[in-house]
Image (tube, rainbow, N blue to C red):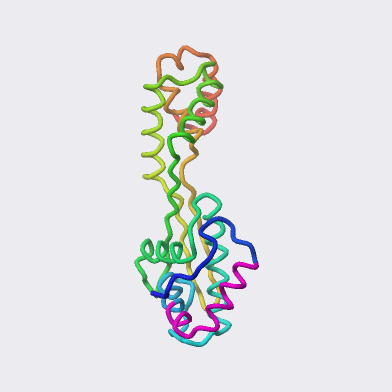
Amino acid sequence: MPTIMPEQSSGTAPQSDYTQFLSLVAKNPSLITGYSKLLKSAGYYKGKITDKYTPALQKAFTKAEEDRLLISAARPMTRDEFLQETIDVSGGADDGPNIRKDIRIFDDSTARTLINAVLEDAIGRGATKEELKKYTLALQKAQKEAPTVTTYSTAGDVQTATTTTGIDEEQFLIQQIAGTDEAKANKVFNYYDAFKTALGVR
């Protein structure tokens, strides 16, 4: 495990920060060795563990940074945190596809905002405390059970990624609310019934 480098703690790092990070690593053989191990375990680097800064290692850093910035838009994390989480999820395998699960869990405030918005649109009122608690727990559970899963496969120097997205939170809440007596009595949900019929869902 390399020594964690000083960097922007999270979020979308400016290009200058990334360039400085690479320059610092490139000058330190022990860091190069450590990061080549991390990148290899995370599935980004396919070469031999080395203390030399090579083009293959540069490509691995670049791909890892691109993926880190994508997820950091929703879940900020440092470079070391990102690589370690990727290793933990993929099991650190050097061969075969690497799989990463990006689990997005709404906090109570975010869930409350969406729940109130859906209820306002559907039946013309905000949620009660009991409804907020009920639907927040249901939504967070559904998000945990249906994460966004990205599977990475490598053939030679070409890496491909296939992503299966998680739940549609708004549609999930509509389904939950549609089953209540109040919603059934409200004509607003007629559009949802039509939507199910169009999809062949009964």
Q: Is residue 191 above or below residue 144?
A: above
Give, as a single range, the part of the protein colored magenta: 16-34
Q: Is residue 17 magenta?
A: yes
Quarter of the picture containing the C terminus is top left
Residue under the point 55% across and 85% down:
54
Secondary structure, magenta segment, majority class: helix
Q: Is residue 20 above or below residue 143?
A: below
Q: Is residue 88 magenta?
A: no
Extreme residue toward the front, this view: 6
Give how far across and how far down residue 107 sits, in percent. 44, 39
Give how far across and how far down residue 130 sits, in percent. 37, 22
Give how far across and how far down residue 197 sits, in percent. 51, 27
Q: Is residue 75 above or below residue 193?
A: below
Residue under the point 46% across and 86% down:
50
Residue under the point 50% across and 33% down:
171
Which quadrant would residue 108 be assigned to in this image? top left
